[in-house]
Image (cartoon, helix red, strand yellow):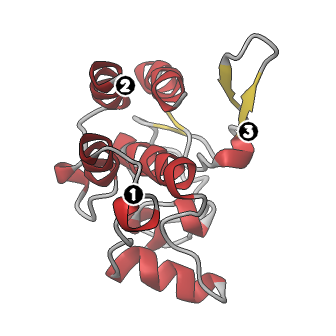
Amino acid sequence: MVGQIAEAVHFAHDRGVIHRDLKPGNILMDTSGRTLVTDFGLAKRIESDSKLTITGQVLGTPSYMAPEQASGRNVTQQADVYALGAVLYRLLTGRPPFQAESVADTIQQVIHSEPDSVRSINGKVPRDLETICFKCLEKEPRRRYNSAESLANDLNRFM
């Protein structure tokens, strides 16, 4: 399922759009089992000079946003890759990688903490799948998959 989502996100990226709010609530499944990405309300053009979003403003859902997004910095496609990893983490463990008592505490965790091991929460998860998940959740964008398509390809190879 996350592979299908990653392919849809890659489709958007190829057309110059970063979603910036990928989370389970923005992913639907139709009656045939196909996944659909919805709610592009916070989306932004990749090559945009638009000043619609003020630098330093935090937009998105804290438990699923990348550290650079939680810090109010400019985001790239790797922010969506991070969010895909957070969604995968939720599917594998039943909880997001970070969730605290307050939004501010959650943001601090996203920026400064490492998530608990997937396998410590769900021992049935294969090590390779945990590795894929944590590659998405790297704090540094350059250490993540270079595209949602690369993530989809790795997930398809795993399957």
Q: Which mark is residue 39?
A: 3
Residues marked 2 and 1 touching at CB (< 8 Å): no
Q: Is residue 41 visible?
A: no
**Rendered-image quadrant of the N terminus:** top right
Q: Seen in the image, is 14 located left or right of residue 145?
A: right
- Residue toward you, 101 or 157: 157
> Going 58% across and 57% down the picture, which residue do you hit?
53
- Residue 152 shows which numbered tag? 2
Whichever of labels 2 and 3 marks the residue nearer the N terminus, that label is 3
User: Mark 1 = which residue?
Assistant: 123
Dot in front, 2 or 1 = 1
Q: Is residue 159 above or below residue 40?
A: above
For numbered disc 2, what is the local secondary structure? Answer: helix
**Rendering coords of residue 32 (x, y %):** 75, 10
| Quadrant of residue 108 within the rendered picture | bottom left
Circle 1 sits in a helix, a strand or a loop, which is it? loop
What amino acid type is highlighted by mark number 2?
Ala
Residue 11 sits above or below residue 18 on the image: above
Residue extending farthest to the left is 143
Query: In the rendered image of this protein, does residue 29 appear above or below residue 116?
Result: above
Q: CA distance from mark 2 to mark 3?
A: 21 Å
Residue displayed at 47% across by 53% down: 89
Instruction: Tell me the crowding category of disc 1: few under 14, some 14 to 19, or many 20 or more residues within 10 angstroms, Cα based.
Output: few
Can you tell which quarter of the image residue 26 is in?
Answer: top right
- Viewed as shown, does residue 54 lie left or right of 74? right
